[in-house]
Image: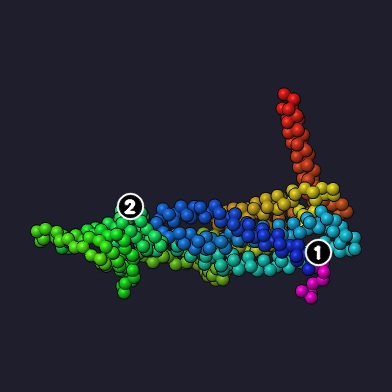
């Protein structure tokens, strides 16, 4: 901290608190809706609840890519908004501290989070996306274990059916068990009931044991005159798991390729044009998302300072709107660029250049034009609209009282 003066340390404190808070809140909001859908999906597939948290953890990097941008922007914006409303910014300007000097700390934050974002979109997100799809595959294929649904007849293996009245410990402990098993080779049939049971591992990875307690076993074959009935305290039933194909590899899915892999593949010759366009669009989408981080300090500063004698929070709303719109526009440009109708590189970087010019123009208006207010017209417009709305409700309420 010795390399920073008192103003720098003050700005670090002002930015850090809202930045961290916004990151946490935005991450929670973005995963909340997906969490409810995952609970429903996992419940329908009969998987354990713990899988939901594993799937959410693998989705978090995808959401954090946008969440970091929003958190950084709001952290800087709220810090400078506080300085402006408390007239501290006027004091800094009066003693000769320029906006460019005040942006030094925000750009240190931006550089750090740009590296974090590069690691996320370039390397962490591809692997987490693959792990998420792997979990979905395992749930649908039943590879997570016996997906026992209470009160329903469940097929285990090829020739066994099981029904339970209760299930605990993620389906490992069962109660009220009824099961049937058939052997088509010799016509043998087994019917079993038990008070409770538990799945146990065996030496064979393709076979699990269902250890039953306090039950009744009925054994029948074509050569039996009458079925044999056996009561038991403990009985182990081997269950052969159905064969499950291994999950696909990461090759061929551009969303699951790291930046290094994308660069390597794009340098290969004889690559199909359609695939090359898709890979280029995906690569430059990630690079544009990282490059946008360096525009956020100037954007946040220009939106943070309201007009004099105004406490409007319009800039906060506009910052979120601009970032989400820019992110969605980049996704749309990636799709169009992947189709090959327009050069993917041009399709991704042209909107970024236009956005950069807009941000620079807003910053220039604030920093170098006396009395400049980049969103002054919008502030005036929304102030007039809000005052009209307030007057309407006042007249409506006063009219209602007189009536």
279 drawn magenta: no
- Circle number at residue 102: 1
Tell me where the magenta segment starts and ends, as one range: 1-8
Query: Residues under labels 1 and 2: Cα distance?
Result: 66 Å
On the image, which quarter does residue 209 sit in?
bottom left
Write the residue at 19% across / 63% down: 230
Badge 2 marks a residue whose secondary structure is: loop
Circle 2 Cα neighbour tier, 10 Å, few/some/many (<14 / 14–19 / ≥20): few
Viewer-nearest of labels 1 and 2? Answer: 2
* Left or right: where 30 falls relative to 248: right
Decide whether residue 4 is among the magenta residues: yes
Quadrant of the frame with the C terminus: top right
Of residues 360 and 392, the one drawn nearer to the viewer in this rendering = 392
- The picture places residue 368, in percent across and down from the top left corner, at 85, 57
Q: Position of residue 337 (x, y in %)?
A: 58, 56
Q: Dominant secondary structure of the magenta stretch?
A: loop
Mark 1 falls on what kind of element? helix
Mark with earlier residue (1, 2): 1
In the rendered structure, the answer to whether residue 201 lies left or right of residue 252 reads left
Please name the residue that numbered disc 2 is placed on: 152
Judge the density around disc 1: few (<14), some (14-19), many (≥20) Cα neighbours within 10 Å.
Answer: some
Q: Residue at x 66, y 58 (%)?
A: 22
Residue 155's x, y, as percent?
Answer: 30, 57
Residue at x 41% of width, y 53% of height: 44
| Residue 6 rendering spot, x and y as whole percentages | 82, 69
């Amino acid at each position: 901290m010795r390399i920073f003066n008192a103003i720098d340390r003050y700005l670090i404190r002002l930015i850090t608190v809202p930045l961290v808070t916004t990151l946490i809140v935005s991450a929670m909001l973005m995963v909340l809706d997906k969490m409810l859908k995952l609970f429903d999906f996992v419940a329908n597939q009969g998987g354990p609840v713990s899988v939901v948290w594993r799937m959410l953890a693998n989705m978090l990097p995808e959401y954090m890519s946008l969440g970091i941008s929003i958190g950084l922007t709001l952290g800087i914006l709220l810090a400078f908004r506080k300085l402006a409303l408390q007239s501290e910014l006027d004091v800094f300007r009066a003693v000769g501290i320029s906006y460019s000097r005040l942006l030094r700390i925000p750009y240190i934050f931006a550089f750090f989070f740009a590296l974090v974002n590069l690691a996320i979109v370039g390397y962490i997100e591809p692997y987490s996306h693959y792990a998420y799809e792997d979990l979905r595959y395992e749930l649908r294929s039943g590879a997570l274990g016996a997906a026992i649904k209470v009160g329903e007849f469940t097929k285990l293996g090829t020739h066994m059916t099981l029904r339970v009245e209760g299930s605990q410990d993620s389906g490992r402990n069962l109660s009220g068990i009824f099961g049937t098993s058939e052997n088509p080779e010799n016509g043998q049939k087994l019917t079993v009931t038990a008070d409770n049971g538990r799945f146990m591992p065996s030496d064979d990875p393709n076979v699990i044991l269902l250890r039953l307690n306090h039950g009744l076993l009925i054994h029948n074959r074509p050569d039996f005159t009458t079925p044999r009935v056996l009561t038991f305290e403990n009985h182990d039933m081997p269950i052969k798991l159905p064969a499950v194909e291994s999950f696909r590899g990461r090759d061929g899915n551009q969303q699951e390729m790291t930046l290094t892999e994308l660069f390597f593949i794009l340098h290969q010759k004889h690559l199909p044009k359609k695939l090359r366009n898709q890979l280029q669009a995906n690569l430059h989408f990630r690079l544009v998302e990282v490059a946008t981080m360096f525009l956020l300090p100037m954007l946040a500063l220009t939106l943070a300072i309201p007009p004099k004698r105004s406490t409007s929070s319009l800039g906060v709303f506009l910052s979120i709107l601009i970032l989400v719109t820019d992110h969605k526009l980049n996704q749309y440009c990636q799709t169009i660029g992947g189709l090959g109708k327009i050069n993917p590189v041009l399709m991704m970087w042209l909107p970024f250049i236009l956005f950069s010019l807009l941000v620079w123009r807003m910053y220039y208006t604030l920093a170098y034009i006396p009395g400049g207010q980049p969103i002054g017209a919008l502030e005036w417009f929304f102030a007039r609209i809000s005052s009209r709305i307030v007057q309407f409700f006042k007249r409506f309420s006063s009219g209602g009282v007189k009536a």
